[in-house]
Image: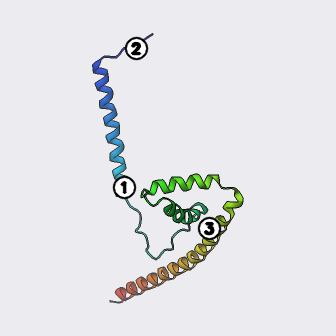
Amino acid sequence: MKVTRGKGAVKKDKNERKAVLKASKSSNKRTKNVKSAKKDPNKPKRPPSAFFVFLEEFRKVYKQEHPNVKAVSAVGKAGGEKWKSLTDAEKAPFEAKAAKRKLDYEKLMTAYNKKQESTEDEDEEESEKSKSEEDDD
């Protein structure tokens, strides 16, 4: 059994697709407008993975060999291909550097979290003091 469609059906399909696209775009707008708490500029940055540690060094070499290439994507693509072609032994120094950076990051984060907790405690004490002063009035 063959189903044929006329021009009216095609227009209807286009309108349905437009409605679906419009609905998905509007839902994306809602999620973009709702932001979580502002990022703390004092919070330590996450450490790079072994690939990004490799890419830092690769980028310097690539720029020397290809001074005319300005596209970041070209450097990233070439770096990805080179990374895939490396053996585990060749990747080991980059993985070791990444692990060291991760340890440093974890130390910084524990210090940062302790500092955050202490400032929260101080804020709570101050708010309790101000409440008790208001009650005294």
Please say if 23 is above or below 75: above
Q: CA distance from mark 2 to mark 1?
A: 42 Å
Q: Is residue 136 left or right of residue 62?
A: left
Label located before the other in sequence (3 or 1): 1
**Rendered residue at 48%/74% (across/down):** 43
Q: Is residue 118 above or below residue 63?
A: below
Instruction: Depth check: give the residue in front, 60 or 64.
Output: 64
Q: Secondary structure at mark 3?
A: helix
Q: Is residue 16 left or right of residue 49?
A: left
Horizontal and vertical percent position of residue 18? 31, 35
Q: Residue under circle 3?
A: 98
- Residue type indicated by callout 1: Lys
Image quarter (top left, top right, bottom left or bottom right) of the C terminus = bottom left
Total residue callouts: 3
* Residue 74 image position (x, y, % from top left): 47, 53
Q: Which residue is mark 1?
A: 32
In which quadrant of the rendered view does residue 83 lie? bottom right
Label 2 vs label 3, nearer the camera: 3
Q: CA distance from mark 2 to mark 3?
A: 60 Å
Give percent across and percent down for residue 122: 47, 84
Q: Among all residues in the image, which is located at the extreme top?
A: 1
Mark positioned earlier in the residue sequence (2 or 3): 2
Amino acid of disc 2 = Val
Q: Which residue is mark 2?
A: 3
- Element type at mark 2: loop
Q: Is residue 102 above or below residue 21?
A: below
